[in-house]
Image (cartoon, rainbow, N blue to C red):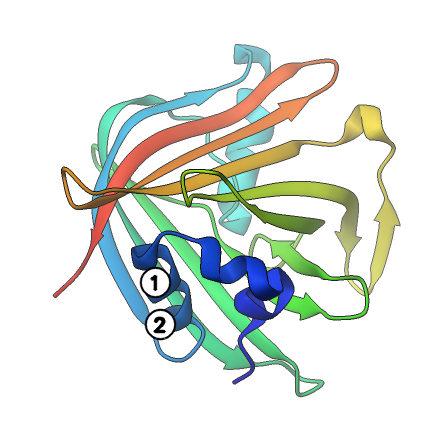
Amino acid sequence: MMPIYSQVLGEEFNQLHPMLQQRYKHIEKEPYEGSGVMKRISRGPKWMSPLMMMGTRRKLLFPEKGTFIPFTIKHKPQTGEAGEDQVHWERVFYFKGKKRYFNALMSLDSERGIIKDYLGEPSVMYSDLALTVLENGGLHIQSKRQRVVLGEKEIPLPRFLQGVATVVETFNDERNVYEIKVSVQNPIMGTIFSYEGEFTEDA
């Protein structure tokens, strides 16, 4: 397996916090499992609930919100149909009596220096992802161009219809935990979905 995250970051990868370097080197080579708690999960306006409920069928979005929600995170390296290296992400949120997912399949576009991110199962959305390292050694991920996936067709989305995602992952040395913040914003509707929490690698 080629290291898709370290390859897209290049020399900047060495500026990541050592625990983040370890984590991302690990998930590029073998399955990774972690568990923790989402201190807060928020969603957009109530009128968006039917759309969010539809997202549950594709393991993408969900209408629930809350605080201190248990969750698990799993990564699995694999090879795509065209022979490309991929990493499958599975995030499961355990609400009372319900399991909700936020899954993705990532691969490298080495020519453009971005991560290709297919969201949902089967995929319904695509985003370019740009990765940078923060001054504190955290990893910053920002979505760029997006497309709707309709079978074999991918239709570019105008900016006003996009859900722009921002992800920040850091490591807390005092508490020995990974911390994660995710926010998906639309220029018109505001917050579509967000969560903030922490996790540790399973033994």
Q: Is residue 72 above or below residue 169?
A: below
Identify the residue at image location x=15%, y=37%: 174
Residue contact at pointers 2 and 1, CB within 8 angstroms? yes
Position of the C terminus by quadrant: bottom left
> Could one spot residue 126 in this view of the protein?
no
Q: Which residue is mark 1?
A: 23
Using the rendered image of the protein, determine whether residue 117 is visible from the camera's viewpoint: yes
Quadrant of res 93: top left
Residue at (17% x, 61% y) in the render: 202
Can you say whether 146 is above or below 161 in the image? below
| Number of numbered discs visible in the structure rendering | 2
Disc marking residue 100: none
What amino acid does circle 1 point to? Arg
Looking at this view, is 167 or 159 the one in front? 167
**Secondary structure found at label 1:** helix
The residue that label 2 is drawn on is 26
Q: Position of residue 96 (x, y in %)?
A: 20, 32
Left or right: residue 140 versus residue 66 is right
**Residue occupying image coordinates x 60% and y 60%:** 9
Badge 2 element? helix
Q: Residue at x 47, y 61 (%)?
A: 14
* Horizontal side, residue 105 vs residue 176: left or right: right
Horizontal placement of 95 versus 83: left or right? left
- Residue 63, compared with residue 140, is above or below; it is above
Looking at the picture, how far across and down is residue 8, in whole percent? 64, 64
